[in-house]
Amino acid sequence: MANLANIVARKTQNDQEWKAQRESERENLMAMQDAGVMEIAGNPDAYSRYLQTQGDNPMYSVGNVALAMAQDAEVTQFGTKERWQAMGRYIAEGEKGRGVQIFARSSFGKGYIITDAYDIRQTQGRDPKQARLTEGSKDMESALTTLLNFSAVPVEADQGLEIPAYYDSQQMKLYVSPEFSDTDAFAAIATEVAHSRFHDKGRNQYYSREECHLDAESVSYILCRRFGIERDMPELSGLRELYNGWGAEDIRRALDYVQDMSKKIGGSIQQGIAPQQHTRGSRQPSRRPAR
């Protein structure tokens, strides 16, 4: 007769060891994430790379982008196996198990689990689709319309403005010049819309254009990167001073706010230029398998 007492005891021990191992892995990954975030805020080269990577991966959190960067010096666009499969790509045979580790929401809907993610160079299949906004296109007009709709203050055209756009925090108005190219306008308007939202109609009494400028420029850069618009990297000479004395949690919270804003604006732009198609054909039930 089987010794059930011993079987139960072994199972309990194995469960405890597995749980301890997973907790250790989680703590190590969290420590790596904190170190990555600190590096981003303290190194202009790392911050530049962060903006590029975040722009290429707009749906991933700051923490996961920091993790991917810390583990893979060549990472560009990355995703889980399931994410790549949804895009018509698969993990190359020789790359399986050689990805980076990130956090993903549990399938049970509570908490996060550790999962593998792979850079695009480790995958094969269909070329990923990227929305690109070009000068004078209908999509660009739609994108600019959506972008201006995110302004927290009234928008006014100003023929005499010497720059494409400017948020006046005293009058709480966003001024836009119609004399610049669409791409220049997009980059500048994105920056100034971000300023208007940081100021929050004057409710943010701590708002300072100087202190918020890098965050606003970062929102603009991430959006431009996402939609294939060329723009200069933000000025980063004051990066270390800006984050001097900040801890990893505070830095992550600040970067999360930038990422969240760019994600929401970018998502609305994406929806406007490539809305989901809901047709009867796309919702037809699948056929029964042949017997």
Image (cartoon, rainbow, N blue to C red):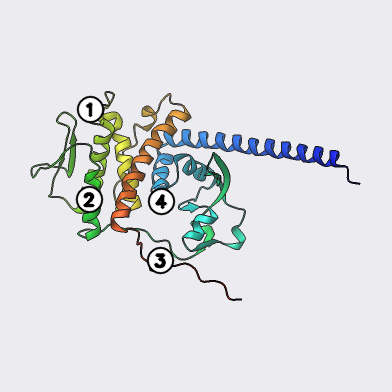
Residue underneath mark 2: 144
> What's the amino acid at mark 3?
Ser
Q: Is residue 234 visible?
A: no
**Circle 1 SS class:** loop
**Circle 4 SS class:** helix
Q: CA distance from mark 1 to mark 2?
A: 24 Å
Can you tell which of label 1 and label 4 is closer to the viewer?
1
Can you tell which of label 3 and label 1 is closer to the viewer?
3
Q: CA distance from mark 4 to mark 3?
A: 29 Å
Asked whether 230 or 195 is in front, the reply is 195
Q: Circles 1 and 2: CB distance less than 8 Å? A: no
Residue underneath mark 1: 202
> What's the amino acid at mark 1?
Gly
Earlier-in-chain disc, 2 versus 4:
4
Question: For mark 3, does the 10 Å Cα neighbourhood hold few (<14), some (14 to 19), or many (20 or more) residues?
Answer: few
Residue underneath mark 3: 282
